[in-house]
Image (cartoon, grey):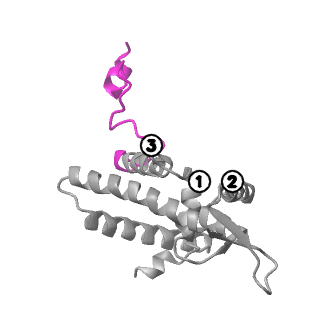
């Protein structure tokens, strides 16, 4: 084993030391990126009693505000390719969770949940809520309100940064404006 491996903290255990944070400017940024990556994986976690696939749940979450969307709007809000969203919508339609319908004066058809889809979304939403509540019961000294406040502040600051850098409003839904 080399002296470099011992001093860098990567010898045999594979652990990363605070000196090994490339390409990030600091260990703090490296660790934040890692935690955000871990957090992002949560959206596709499997729940044994789930009715909906993760993709159908994501679509239903967008539609849970009661406003029907076009395929293009769903594509923008989900941040996925249109072909992927089209395939996911078609699969949810096949299972009876979504339906397409026409709106007078619109060239595009809209998508909305069916009663079956709303029931499945409610069921699966309660599973996720129970896991979140159990997680907060196990988290000390954190609180749901504290996490919400920090996540909201982070997302709003991030959206402002992207807007300044690109000129694009990354939050197509206006969620960041809805909560002040």
Q: Select label 2 or label 1 by which is in front.
A: 2
Image location of residue 101, percent across then percent down: 74, 74
Q: Are marks 2 and 3 in contact (CB under 8 Å)?
A: no
**How crowded is the residue under tag 1: few (<14 C-alpha within 10 Å), some, or many (20+)?**
some
Q: Secondary structure at mark 2?
A: helix
- For residue 108, side relative to residue 64 (left or right): right
Check disc 1 and report the residue beneath it.
Answer: 55
Q: Secondary structure at mark 1?
A: helix
User: How far, Cα to Cα, is label 3 from label 1?
Assistant: 16 Å
Check disc 2 and report the residue beneath it.
Answer: 91
Indicate the quadrant where residue 123 lies. Answer: bottom left
Q: Are marks 3 and 1 in contact (CB under 8 Å)?
A: no
**How crowded is the residue under tag 2: few (<14 C-alpha within 10 Å), some, or many (20+)?**
some
Check disc 3 and report the residue beneath it.
Answer: 48
Residue drawn at (22%, 54%), measured in percent from left and top? 137
Indicate the quadrant where residue 116 lies. Answer: bottom right
Q: Foreground: 147 or 54?
A: 54
Q: Are marks 2 and 1 in contact (CB under 8 Å)?
A: yes
Q: Select label 3 or label 1 by which is in front.
A: 3
Decide whether the magenta segment is chiefly helix, strand or loop: loop
- Quadrant including the N terminus: top left
- For residue 154, side relative to residue 92 (left or right): left
Q: Foreground: 177 or 119?
A: 119
User: How far, Cα to Cα, is label 2 from label 1?
Assistant: 10 Å
- For residue 159, side relative to residue 20 (left or right): right
């Amino acid at each position: 084993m080399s002296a470099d491996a011992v001093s860098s903290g990567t010898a045999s255990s594979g652990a990363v030391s605070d000196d090994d944070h490339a390409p990030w400017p600091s260990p703090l940024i490296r660790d934040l990126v890692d935690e955000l990556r871990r957090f992002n994986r949560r959206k596709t976690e499997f729940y044994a009693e789930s009715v909906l696939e993760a993709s159908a749940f994501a679509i239903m979450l967008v539609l849970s505000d009661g406003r029907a969307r076009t395929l293009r709007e769903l594509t923008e809000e989900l941040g996925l390719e249109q072909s992927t969203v089209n395939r996911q919508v078609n699969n949810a339609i096949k299972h009876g969770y979504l339906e397409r319908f026409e709106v007078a004066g619109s060239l595009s058809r809209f998508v909305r949940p069916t009663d079956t889809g709303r029931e499945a979304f409610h069921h699966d939403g309660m599973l996720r809520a129970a896991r979140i509540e159990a997680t907060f019961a196990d988290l000390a000294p954190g609180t749901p309100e504290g996490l919400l406040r920090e996540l909201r502040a982070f997302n709003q600051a991030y959206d402002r940064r992207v807007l300044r850098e690109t000129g694009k409003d990354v939050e197509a839904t206006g969620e960041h404006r809805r909560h002040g």
